[in-house]
Each structure stands twice: as structure tokens, then as C-alpha cells.
Image: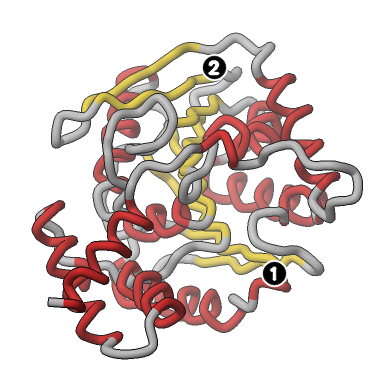
């Protein structure tokens, strides 16, 4: 009984809708993230001056999900898949400007239970991947003969890994930056760092709670295993300070499709595009040219 109570506490603490205004909030010059956050806000102000359209889709379970579409000069579209409790527009602004400069249309969805999108709970990618399929369908209505790139960061990278096993019209390749690689693994780390006793029982109660809330078996979301059924070329990236080198190398080894791996020196979680801009953007340019054309 106590384990079930603890599982429910973790479930609500981790998955209940968060205040995304805290994500990428401006910091002072003394903060180590000042340069990155300053670039985020400058980029946000700039991208908001571009022509854009408000888009929405209805999820399979009836939620209205919101997004912003920035038309480019081609029929190529980059769909940004943001991270856990993140502010989609802030997170995507700097990379969005980069993709837009290459002629891409840029689509920035707010995932369920984030910002203006409806939903009470985040699911760490289990239902979010189904939502992104809806956005892919909407892009294909706009550009039926176009090509699509999915770029996900952190939890969004996990969504991309899940989608890499699904067949989607006009999706040509994917990028997963510092991706979550397992939903049970993520919860296992949280439980292990929070409780000293009966961790396995608490995790099993969490899995049961996850099933009852979402009708989803959490154990089906080990992306290190699922990647063996990958269907798309994949670019994997992370900062050297994240300690993900071995994990990404395993993903690369197990993906049957062409896979590139970029480790960004001196970078932490989510700031590779800012601290190693030329290195990361050059890698992306080469990758998209190889699988989406010039």
C-alpha cells in the first residue's frame, strides 16, 4: 500500500503539467548559462518577426494541440520536438532560425500538457509520438510532395527515437539530441534517487499507474531495443559533458539505417547548438543534404 502511494506521488510530481515559463528564463551575467539564454531570447524576438501561422491538431484522445508554422522558401519542413516541461518557442528559436535560413519551413508544436496545448499529463514520449504523427499529417496536407525532418531534444529526442520505428509519409530523416532512451529507465532513476527501500515495487506500481492512466505499457518504451527496427537515417548528438557517448554509440550500432554521431566538446545538456554552433550546424547541413537534397 505504501509503495502504491509513493508511486502515485512520483507519477503526479513528474507527469503533471508544468509551468513552462520557467524554461529558458532570463538569467544574470554571472550565470554560466547567460550567453546561451541571451541567445535564446534574442532569437525568439527575431523569429517572431517572421511571417507565421497558428496551427492546431486534435490528438487521438481528443486534445487540442497548438503549434506555430513559419513558412520557408521550399517544400522541406523541420518539425521541432521539444523537451520535458520546456517552452517550445524559446527552445526552438535559435535552431529554428538556422533551419529557416536553409529554406526550411519550421513547425514548432507544443506537446500535450505544455503551454497552449491541452492535456493534464506528460507521458515522456509514449503518447507524444502519436501526436507528432498528427503534425506530420498536417504538414503533408500543406506540402503533399515535400520532405520532412524531425529534430527532437531530450524528451523530444526520445519521441524521435520512438517515431524512427514508424512509417510516416514524406519523413526522410531524423535528429535526436541528447535523447531519453527509456521511459522505465527515466522513472527508475527518479525512484532510485528518491527512495531507499522497495524501489522495484514502487517502479512496478508506477508502471501499473501508467497503464491505468494512459492504456500504455511503459515497458514497450526502451528505445535502445526498439531502434533495431529503425526506418530512417538518424543523426545522434549530445554534449561531451553529458556522459552519453556510450549510449549513443549503442544506438548507432543497433540502428539498421545510416546513423551519424556527433559529440559536441565542452557542451552540457541542450546547449550544443549554442556553444559549438559551427560544428553542430555543419553536421546538420551535411546530414540533411545527404537525405533531403540541397
* Image position, residue 74 (x, y; %): 55, 22
Q: CA distance from mark 1 to mark 2?
A: 31 Å
Residue 203, disc: none
Q: Locate residue 177: give its quadrant.
A: bottom right
Left/right placement of residue 133 relative to residue 248 reads: left
Residue 153 appears anywhere in the view: yes
Q: Helix or strand or loop: what does disc 1 sit on? A: strand
Placement of 159 over or under 21, stated as above or below: below
Residue in view at x 84 percent, y 51 percent: 31
Which residue has dot 2 on it? 71
Colour scheme: secondary structure
Placement of 174 over or under 205, stated as above or below: above
Quarter of the image that includes the C terminus: top right
Residue lying furthest front: 2
* Image position, residue 24 (x, y; %): 66, 41
Count of marks overlaid on the render: 2
Residue in view at x 49 percent, y 74 percent: 252
* Image position, residue 52 (x, y; %): 54, 12
Residue 263, disc: 1
Residue in view at x 33 percent, y 34 percent: 136
| Relative depth, front residue between 187 and 143 | 187
Quarter of the image that includes the N terminus: bottom left
Local crowd size for mark 2, using a 10 Å CA cut-off: few (<14), some (14–19), many (≥20): some
Residue 139 appears anywhere in the view: no
Left/right placement of residue 72 relative to residue 234 reads: right
Which is nearer the N-term, disc 1 or disc 2? 2
Residue in view at x 81 percent, y 68 percent: 266
Placement of 241 over or under 180, stated as above or below: below
| Relative depth, front residue between 69 and 144 | 69
Q: Helix or strand or loop: what does disc 2 sit on? A: loop
Amino acid at each position: 500500500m505504501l509503495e502504491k502511494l509513493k508511486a502515485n506521488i512520483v507519477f503526479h510530481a513528474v507527469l503533471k503539467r508544468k509551468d513552462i515559463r520557467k524554461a529558458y528564463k532570463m538569467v544574470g551575467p554571472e550565470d554560466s548559462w547567460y550567453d546561451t539564454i541571451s541567445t535564446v531570447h534574442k532569437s525568439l524576438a527575431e523569429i517572431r518577426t517572421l511571417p507565421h501561422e497558428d496551427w492546431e491538431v486534435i490528438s487521438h484522445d481528443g486534445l487540442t494541440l497548438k503549434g506555430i508554422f513559419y513558412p520557408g522558401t521550399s517544400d522541406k519542413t523541420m518539425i521541432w520536438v521539444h523537451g520535458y516541461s520546456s517552452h517550445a518557442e524559446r527552445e526552438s528559436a535559435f535552431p529554428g532560425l538556422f533551419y529557416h535560413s536553409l529554406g526550411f519551413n519550421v513547425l514548432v508544436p507544443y506537446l500535450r500538457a505544455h503551454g497552449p496545448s491541452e492535456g493534464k499529463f506528460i507521458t515522456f514520449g509514449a503518447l507524444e509520438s502519436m501526436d507528432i504523427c498528427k503534425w506530420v499529417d498536417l504538414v503533408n496536407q500543406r506540402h503533399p510532395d515535400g520532405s520532412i525532418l524531425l529534430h527532437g531534444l531530450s524528451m523530444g529526442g526520445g519521441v524521435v527515437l520512438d517515431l524512427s520505428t514508424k512509417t510516416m509519409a514524406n519523413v526522410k530523416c531524423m535528429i535526436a539530441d541528447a535523447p531519453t532512451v527509456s521511459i522505465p529507465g527515466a522513472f527508475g532513476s527518479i525512484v532510485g534517487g528518491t527512495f531507499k527501500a522497495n524501489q522495484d515495487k514502487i517502479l512496478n506500481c508506477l508502471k501499473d499507474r501508467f497503464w491505468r492512466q494512459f492504456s500504455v505499457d511503459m515497458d514497450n518504451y526502451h528505445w535502445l531495443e526498439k531502434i533495431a527496427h529503425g526506418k530512417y537515417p538518424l543523426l545522434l548528438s549530445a554534449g561531451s559533458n553529458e556522459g552519453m557517448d556510450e549510449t549513443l554509440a549503442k544506438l548507432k550500432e543497433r540502428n539498421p539505417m545510416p546513423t551519424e554521431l556527433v559529440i559536441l566538446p565542452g557542451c552540457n545538456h541542450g546547449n550544443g547548438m549554442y556553444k559549438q554552433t559551427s560544428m553542430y550546424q555543419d553536421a546538420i547541413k551535411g546530414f540533411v543534404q545527404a537525405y533531403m537534397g540541397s
